Image: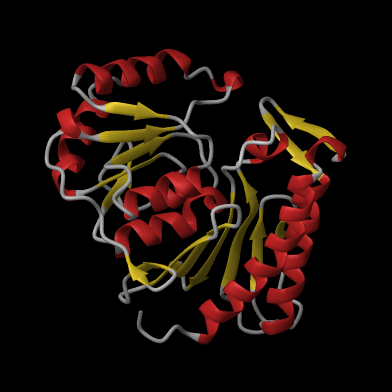
Amino acid sequence: MSTISATLNIMIRAAERAARSLTRDFGEVENLQVSRKGPGDFVSAADRRAEEIIYEELSKARPDTAFLMEEQGVVAPIKAGDGNPARWIIDPLDGTSNFLHGLPHWAISIAYEEKGEITAGLVYDPIKNELFTAERNKGAFMRRKRLRVSGRVSLVESMIATGAPRRSLGQKERFLKECDAVIDAGGSLRRYGAASLDLTYVAAGRYDGYWERSLKPWDVAAGYLIVREAGGFGCDLDSDSNNAVETGNILVANEGCYQPLKKLIRACG
């Protein structure tokens, strides 16, 4: 792994500190105070504590940087700078439902955005001790291991991940049609409930592709950069623009599966 930047070092320090808090809470999951935030979307005391820890660490290191966070939303920089500050995009606990049910598949996601472009990303799975990172034009890594997407070239031999839409969004019929199309094409389908990890698993070659709709920037900003730096391809589900982080409708895959998967999913619209 090449020498990492000061920015990524700051992100790692914040994530590791938050992970210690989350891991303790995960061990006491039955005692967590849980409130209902929306259909199928729960927020816990652990979630809020982790976000506060990350915010404290990052704002202390970069007081002139803005924040976009899952729980607190948009937060202006502590120290005023220019009119277009860089910002951190944070999901302190991606996979909250898994966490609350005692399933060991959740992660912390932090991205750094400068002038509208994601330049650094981190996804940390404390339970498996897997730290995925990437910096723009510097490659993607899991710890010191360089990440590369898989070399599979056919959907018949592929493993594809997805995420189910919320019940209130009225997208169930289209989603089930898309799942049927992938299965009929021979793909092995997975739904694990943590978008950031789905993306990093594509980067690591564990999955060959992934698609999902109606995500938020904090779900995908870090993971999308990691996929691209690992040699993967990505786009908005409904267009070839590179604004999937903003739209929340994302498709990523390795080179061999990207075009076939995109064609298959779009044909279901």
Residue 110 vs 136, above or below: the answer is: above
Q: Quadrant of the N terminus?
A: bottom left
161 up-or-down from 129: above or below: above
Residue occupying the point 72% across, 29% down: 38
Q: Looking at this view, is 72 or 127 the one in front?
A: 127
Q: Residue at x 26, y 23 (%)?
A: 182
Please determine whether, in this image, residue 169 is positioned above or below residue 17: above
Which of 35 and 197 lies nearest the eye of the viewer? 197
**161 and 181: which one is in front?**
161
Nearer the observer, 239 or 254: 254
* Quarter in which the C terminus is drawn: top left
Give residue 79's quadrant in the image: bottom right
265 vs 69, left or right, is left
Residue 104 appears in the rendering:
yes
Residue 223, image x, y percentages: 44, 55
Residue 155 place in picture, x, y as percent? 17, 32
Horizontal relation, residue 260 to residue 224: left or right: left
Report the colour scheme.
secondary structure
Measured from the top left, where is residue 72 in percent x and y?
A: 75, 54
Classify residue 30 as left or right of residue 173.
Answer: right
Q: Quadrant of residue 227?
A: bottom left
Relative image position of residue 77 (x, y in whole percent)? 71, 75
Residue located 53% across and 86% down the image: 6
- Residue at left 30%, top 75%? 137
